Amino acid sequence: MLFTITRGLILAAIVFCSGAYAAKITQNTNARPHINLDGAWHYIADPYENGFYNHRYQEHTRDGYFKNAQVEQPGDLIEYDFANAATLNVPGDWNTQQDELFLYEGTVWYQRDFTLNKSRDERYILHFGAANYEAVVYVNGQKVGTHIGGFTPFEFDVTDVVSDGDNFVIVKVDNRREREQIPTVNTDWWNYGGLTRSVKLLTLPKQHISDYSIHLADGDSNSITGWVELNQPLNNARVTVEIPELKVKQTLKFTGDARQNFQFKAEPILWGPSNPKLYDVHFRLQEQTLSDRIGFRQIDTKGEDILLNGKPIFLKGISIHEESALHPGRAWSQADAKQLLSMAKELGVNFVRLAHYPHNEHMVRMADEMGLLVWSEIPVYWTVLFERDDVYANAQNQLSEMISRDKNRASIILWSMANETPMSDARLTFISKLAAKARELDGTRLITAALDTSSETDKGKSIDDPLSAVVDVIGINNYCGWYYKEPAQCAKVRWFSDNNKPVIMSEFGGGALAGYHGAAEQRWSEEYQADLYRYNLQMIDNMSFIRGMTPWILKDFRSPRRPLANIQDFWNRKGLVSDKGVKKQAWHILNQYYEQHQ
Ligand code: GCB
């Protein structure tokens, strides 16, 4: 206990001192010049954090593993050796790459060399797609920063630390779960550790465009607006924003500022599931051109309706964890994104809930291309310590990093603040503050949260969680036929909502082992799960205020909470397909339902 508190305080100190919560992230990193640092990294598992603390439990300042020391004299005592250590592939979780790390929670050190032709005209930014959970980053033996949070990008300017020629980078990644984290200690997914997303050294001109935002003006589909931000304020700089296909080009003049707003008239074909039209957009500063593919669309609510481009839409969705059928462990690649989202499309969806944390950037870019609407969320999940300011700061930072990376993706229509959080005043204050922050950072999307609280009344189940007043769209998680009632009883369950807001059934479902057949009463059989879907869909048909659903879940996913031998074997079996992608009967029930509800 004492250890936990002390570690919490140390962490808070590290975080605030090293600026781990400054959410500045270079936009569109794949389109930037960079040195790709993916591939084999040497690693040392360090459960006692021997490479970080000395025997008096003080942080090493001179001779920790970050030094990457090599034996020079025969008598040298160095008890680690990255050069001869085994390797892990980056990106990738460590759990599924080495048997000994499968259940490991703790510190792993990563090391790799790289060479650089250093130029005086460039800035070097070391960019991480994500590292779960806490990363301490060193370049050439110097600490360059710390980051907390397992699913969002972060970066450090390492210009002054890198050398011409040989360099090395070392990252201490720690995935221990702690009570004060976001997410907290108890979740229902695998705690995959490591450098789970790509690592790049961005090699950028000294003055460059660091970020931009571009979207339709609120309520005006013939007006495109946004801003461009430079990495430093400039006098007399010009940036052009051009969309050749729309024949628009505007030049922005920077007179001592780092950010300039823009707005111009245009008549884009609006992006949507039936026509996911994307435009090439070019931002130019001096000789640099930065290009992106952008969709333009409006998203609003009106009473109980969700309006996409002004028209009511029903969100036929599915929930997805970041695990694909292509390989074990965390999904990270474009191929993973394609596999998952193609499977979702085949199910007949126009909407995906990317649960329960921000997924990798390939997912949202692929959703843009494929015309899938997206719910994106931060891991404010279950029993977070809502009373604590440092916990809030962490959640807000993860929210800011998610929005910063993905603000230009037309597919994303909903930012979700939380999942199934227990009611309390502290929780209401915490999530209300997050929602206000999200609206401040991005006024172009809707705010939601998945609630699991409803009260029983004479009329039926009432959606009366006070968070309903805070969000634009109410998500409800409800496991009728699984955690309560038998499936057949679900058809008769009645709900009502006095919120005059759209409601999405953000979760329902039940487990089945693919290939296990039996009577419909037989738990874990495909027949049971199929029946549960049939009756829940009947229940949903009686909910006049429902405007979408994301049943739980597309594919079986790993979870330490699910040990049942020969059935679960540490998989949550609520997938409509098995972990290998084999369809279960319930898949066809939902597929038919979606086909009939055009
Ligand atoms: C939920 C959670 C989800 C779990 C699911 C389950 O309500 O939101 O993360 O995996 O239930 O399978 O119980």
Image: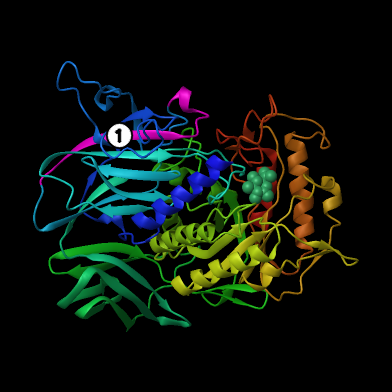
Q: Which residue sits at x=56%, y=58%?
A: 351
Q: How many numbered discs, if any? A: 1
| Quarter holding residue 292 | bottom left
| Residue 113 located left or right of residue 171 | left
| Quarter holding residue 575 | top right
Image coordinates of residue 499 in percent, x first then y, are 72, 74
Q: Please say if 462 is above or below 126.
A: below
| Quadrant of the frame with the N terminus | top right
Image coordinates of residue 319 in percent, x first then y, are 59, 51
Return the residue nearer the eye: 538 or 26: 26
Q: Which residue is mark 1?
A: 64
Return the residue nearer the eye: 264 or 180: 180
Q: Please say if 323 is above or below 75.
A: below
Span colored in magenta: 98-117
Residue type indicated by callout 1: Gly
Image coordinates of residue 299 in percent, x first then y, are 52, 73
Q: Secondary structure at mark 1?
A: loop
**Residue 518 seen from this side:** yes
**Residue 361 seen from this side:** no
Image coordinates of residue 93 in percent, x first then y, are 43, 36
